[in-house]
């Protein structure tokens, strides 16, 4: 496929795959992921997410996500609303608290 200057001919999903591959090759101690798999189909997302979790081991990860399933396995989650931190803890702790995270999780997981 013709990539074009600075990747302009790539789809959003193709750009995300390349960005994730670069992260895997660089092996940086800190990862910043902003909606890392949002432009991928479910099958590609599942495969990449599994590899990302392996890559995250022993690293500091700042992940911005609206799809909570992509961050539920993280050690510590920080929930922000209108620019302020309103909750923090593990997925299990936040679901048990019954706050905003729990409400969003329930909506997204169909529970």
Image (cartoon, rainbow, N blue to C red):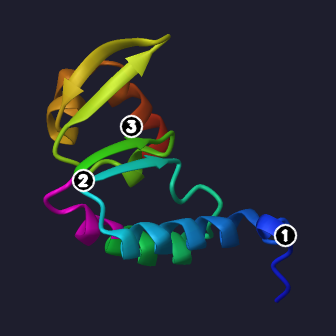
Q: Say if 50 sits above or below 101 in the image.
A: below
Q: Earlier in the sequence, mark 1 or mark 3?
A: 1
Q: Position of residue 71 (x, y in %)?
A: 34, 48
Q: Say if 83 sits above or below 14 in the image.
A: above
Q: Secondary structure at mark 1?
A: helix
Q: Say if 54 sits above or below 78 in the image.
A: below
Q: Position of residue 41 (x, y in %)?
A: 62, 70
Q: Earlier in the sequence, mark 2 or mark 3?
A: 2
Assign the N terminus to one quadrant of the image: bottom right
Q: Secondary structure at mark 3?
A: helix
Hey, which quadrant is residue 93 in on the image? Answer: top left
Tell me if 42 is positioned left or right of 48 in this view. Answer: right
Q: Where does label 3 land, which residue?
A: 105
Q: Position of residue 33 (x, y in %)?
A: 44, 49
Q: Check residue 54 for magenta coloring.
A: yes
Mark 1 Cα-neighbour bin, 10 Å: few <14, some 14–19, many ≥20: few
What whole-number distance in Å separates the C-alpha atoms at marks 1 and 2? Answer: 37 Å
In this view of the protein, can residue 80 be seen by the observer? yes
Q: Say if 48 sits above or below 76 in the image.
A: below
Kindly identify which numbered label has been placed on residue 88.
Answer: none
Q: Secondary structure at mark 2?
A: loop
Kindly identify which numbered label has been placed on residue 5.
Answer: 1
Kindly identify which numbered label has been placed on residue 73.
Answer: 2
Residue visible at 19% across and 38% down in the picture: 76
Q: Which residues are magenta?
A: 52-59
Chief secondary structure of the magenta portion: helix
């Amino acid at each position: 496929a013709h990539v074009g200057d600075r990747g302009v001919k790539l789809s959003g999903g193709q750009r995300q795959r390349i960005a994730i591959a670069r992260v895997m090759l660089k092996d940086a101690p800190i990862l910043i992921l902003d909606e890392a798999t949002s432009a991928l189909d479910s099958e590609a997302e599942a495969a990449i997410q599994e590899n990302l979790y392996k890559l995250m081991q022993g690293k500091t990860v700042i992940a911005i996500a609206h799809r909570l399933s992509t961050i539920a396995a993280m050690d510590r989650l920080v929930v922000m609303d209108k620019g302020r931190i309103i909750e923090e803890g593990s997925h299990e702790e936040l679901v048990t608290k019954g706050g905003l995270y729990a409400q969003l999780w329930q909506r997204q997981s169909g529970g």
